Amino acid sequence: MIHINENFLKLKASYLFSDIAKRVSNYQEANPEQTIIKLGIGDVTEPLPKVCLEALHTAIDEMGKRETFHGYGPEQGYDFLREAIAKHDFQNRGANISADEIFVSDGSKCDSANFQEIFSEDIRIAIPDPVYPVYVDTNVMAGRTGENIDDRYENLVYLEATKDNNFSPALPTEPVDLIYLCYPNNPVGVTLNKE
């Protein structure tokens, strides 16, 4: 008989971004005269620039012809893209990063979830608070936490990011196996300096 992963039952009832969307919608309804600039997930305020539209159309036309159709890309990403990223995002800034060190994926959310699967269930995790919810939720689903009590999961070490410490938490004072360092940290946008 197949069984469900009971760890999913520990997740809070709603996803943060669903809650934010509901709050924005309620606010708009109550305040129709207010102009709102949304900065939430997937919210944009401007149309795509012409250069992006042209690139999209070129790619669509390419995929519509047998002689230029190429199907799915390589698992690490197209070489031309990885080389461009290495050159323009790293090498031009003095970082010796080569194309074979770059992995192009479908997004950080799935990468964050997939990456933690290489570690055992019994490791101890430290996570900044606040932090992007996927870092917490994927570890809950993997069985690395206890129950959620007062909006905190047992067995996670929370690194407090507050206005008092400029949203840059101190390293944990207790032993942990894995620390999520997220900078710039979503949702606060803080970056760390070299020191």
Image (cartoon, grey):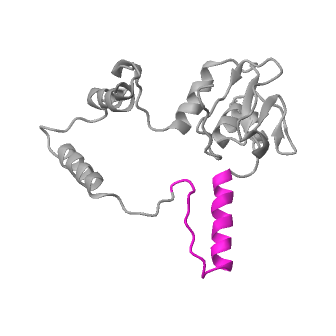
Q: Is residue 134 above or below residue 101?
A: below
Residue farthest to the bottom, as pictured: 33
Pick the front one: 61 or 195: 195
Percent position (x, y) of residue 83?
Answer: 30, 26
Locate residue 150, reporting x and y percent.
Answer: 87, 45
Compare residues 170 and 104 and report the one nearer the observer.
170
Residue in the picture at 58% in, 39% down: 184
61 falls in the magenta region: no
Q: Position of residue 186 (x, y in %)?
A: 62, 43
Identify the residue at the far left of this view.
67
Q: Is residue 187 above or below residue 24?
A: above
The residue under the point 31% across, 57% down is 49
Judge whether residue 3 can be spotted in this image. Answer: no
Please state the horizontal and vertical placement of residue 74, each as a whole percent of the image.
Answer: 33, 27
| The quadrant where residue 174 appears | top right
Residue 40 is covered by the magenta coloring: yes
At x 79%, y 30%, the residue is 156
Q: Which quadrant of the rendered structure holds the C terminus? A: top right
Q: Which residues are magenta?
A: 16-42
On the rendered structure, is 80 left or right of 177?
A: left
Residue 179, visible in the rendered structure? yes
Q: Image quadrant of residue 22?
A: bottom right
